[in-house]
Every structure is written in C-alpha cells, then in structure tokens.
Image: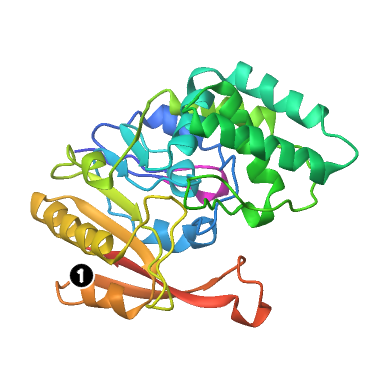
C-alpha cells in the first residue's frame, strides 16, 4: 500500500484516505475557502488542536452541527456531509453551492443600497428577513439577507426570540458582506458536499466504520441553571444526553468521533466514564462583554 502525503500551502497535510481525490484536495487547499459568516462558538482558533488530533485516515466525513464551517473549510474532506438545525443557515450553504452568481448579485445589491443611516437600514432588513422566515421563503434573497445581517449584527451572534424571530442588534459596521472570490471557491468545493438540515441523529444515520464524525455540539452552559440556544427549538440537557448516547453508538459502529464543548461538569459526566480521551484546551471567548471573562476552557473528546 502506497501512502501519499502532500504538504501544501500553510503546512496543510492531505491524509491517506482510500476515497479521497488527492489532486482535488491539494488544489482546493491553496484557494480562499474560509467561513463566509462569523459564528459564535466557531472553531477557527482551535483548528491547530483539532487537526493534530485527527485520525490518521478516514473514509467519509460527517459534521452534524456545521455552524460557520471553520473545520470543514480547513480540512476540505471529500465525501462529506454537513448538517445544521438552523434552516436559514443551511439554505445559505445551498444557495452558495447551487447559485453563487445570483447570491453574490443579491448581496452586492444589499451592500450598495445601504443608506447613510446604517442602523435604520439594518433594522429594516432584519424585519424583512424575519418576514421571509415566517413565510418559510428559503431562497437566494433570504441567503443574502442572512449573510448581510450576520456581518452587520453584534458579534455575529445568531439569536432568536420565542417566536423564532432574529433579534440581534446592529453593530455599526458598514463593511462589505462577502469576498466574491471566496464565495466562488466555496461554491466549487460544496459541489461535492451533501448539505442537509435537521436533527443531528438523522445526519449521522449513515455513518459507518472508518468514517470520521466531527461534533461541534451546542455549548453546555457554564452556569448549569441556564440553558439557552441559538435556535428556537433549544438544546437542553436531554439533547446533550441524547448526543452522548449517539457518540457511544457511533463508537460502537467503528466511527472515529471528535466532540468539542465547554469544559463543564455536565460534559465531563456524560463522556468521562467511557474511556474516551478528553483534552482540556484554553480558548478566548470574544462574545463575553466582560474582557476579564474572555478566557475559558473547552474540551476536545476523541474515541480513538
């Protein structure tokens, strides 16, 4: 068996994967494929720690909580599936994949029409975005609104109220919403990725022995008395328990699994007695308004 190791720009390593198109992965690694939204809890700062803990080789790639996509856009795996319960986010991935030119045209229009009063303009678009959400109009316009609002809201935070309406305030930014070249490269890469929205268990139903499942699960709260989520459906204690059961099931199937979360008592209780490797790493928390509380700990849990 011949093992191919390619060293690419930024010292990225393309691993020996029996189903990988090595030439494509090498080529894509040199292009501007990066997250197109800012996402609370994104894993860009943990990429070195995640990459050094990757399995030596794997077959298919599954990411049931894709969020902003920092990990998949760094690894660029072939035969990948991404999922998120946030339908507006997943719609944006699909529109960029299937209609990048129309998406860019719509975003450019929003940027160009920004009035002198950026705050008033932002809130008018936020209202329009929420109207389309309520009507379930998952189209190119909604995707453009999603990205514009993400780039012009406070800290890229996605938060909805009890009615499912986006309610994050304006951040006073007038920056361009997207990098056109990056969007086109993202679109090319996503052509080979299966994109779905729904429950994390359903997203992993076809994962089998030799596949890699990266689980960037919704954070368990640092304060155990408060459970909040960026989706109106919520991700409560029972959801965390169900996810831990899925982690055990995937392990039994022979999947390589890696999970990240806050270093909390709940997470250690759920995963600490199964013989899994649990590494504690320090992180910066950019969302916290109190600068003294912007350093914390996360765990990277692996079953291999």
**Residue picked out by circle 1:** 276
Above or below: residue 174 compared with residue 217: above
Residue 8 forms part of the magenta stretch: yes
Q: Position of residue 14 (x, y in %)?
A: 40, 42
Indicate left or right for 15 with 297 as reference: left
Choose between 134 and 283: the one closer to the eye. Answer: 134
Indicate left or right for 239 with 112 as reference: left
What residue is at 32 percent from the left and 45 percent from the top?
64
What residue is at 47 percent from the left and 54 percent from the top?
230
User: Can residue 186 be seen in the rendering of this structure?
Assistant: yes
Above or below: residue 97 compared with residue 175: above
Farthest front residue?
A: 163
Instruction: Identify the image quadrant of the N terminus.
Output: top left
Colour convention of the picture: rainbow
Residue 5 forms part of the magenta stretch: no
Above or below: residue 185 compared with residue 3: above
Report helix, strand or loop for mark 1.
loop
Farthest left residue?
A: 252
Question: What are the residue bounds of the magenta stretch?
Answer: 7-13
Farthest right residue?
A: 116
Q: Position of residue 157 (x, y in %)?
A: 58, 54
Q: Residues within 10 Å of mark 1 (few under 14, many from 20)?
A: some
Q: Residue 102, located in which quarter of the rendered image?
A: top right
């Amino acid at each position: 068996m011949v093992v191919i190791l390619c060293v690419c720009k930024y010292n990225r390593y393309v691993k020996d994967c029996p189903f990988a198109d090595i030439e494509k992965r090498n080529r894509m690694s040199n292009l501007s494929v990066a997250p197109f939204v800012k996402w609370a809890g994104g894993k860009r700062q943990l990429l070195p720690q995640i990459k050094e803990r990757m399995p030596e080789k794997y077959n298919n790639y599954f990411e049931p909580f894709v969020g902003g996509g920092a990990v998949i856009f760094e690894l660029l795996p072939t035969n990948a599936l991404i999922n998120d319960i946030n339908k507006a986010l997943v719609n944006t991935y699909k529109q960029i994949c299937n209609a990048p030119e129309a998406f860019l045209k719509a975003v450019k229009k929003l940027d160009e029409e920004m009035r002198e009063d950026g705050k008033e303009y932002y809130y008018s678009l936020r209202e329009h975005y929420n109207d389309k959400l309520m009507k379930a109009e998952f189209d190119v316009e909604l995707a453009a609104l999603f990205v514009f609002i993400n780039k012009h809201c406070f800290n890229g935070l996605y938060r909805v109220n009890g009615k499912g309406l986006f309610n994050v305030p304006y951040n006073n930014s007038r920056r361009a919403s997207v990098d056109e070249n990056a969007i086109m490269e993202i679109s090319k890469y996503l052509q080979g990725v299966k994109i779905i929205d729904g429950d994390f268990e359903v997203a992993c139903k076809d994962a089998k022995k030799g596949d890699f499942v990266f689980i960037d699960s919704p954070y368990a709260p640092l304060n155990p008395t408060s459970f909040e989520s960026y989706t109106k459906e919520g991700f409560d204690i029972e959801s965390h328990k169900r996810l831990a059961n899925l982690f055990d099931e995937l392990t039994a199937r022979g999947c390589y699994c890696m999970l990240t979360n806050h270093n909390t008592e709940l997470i250690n209780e759920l995963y600490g007695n199964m013989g899994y490797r649990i590494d504690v790493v320090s992180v910066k928390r950019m969302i916290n308004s109190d600068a003294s509380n912007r350093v914390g700990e996360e765990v990277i849990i692996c079953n291999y």
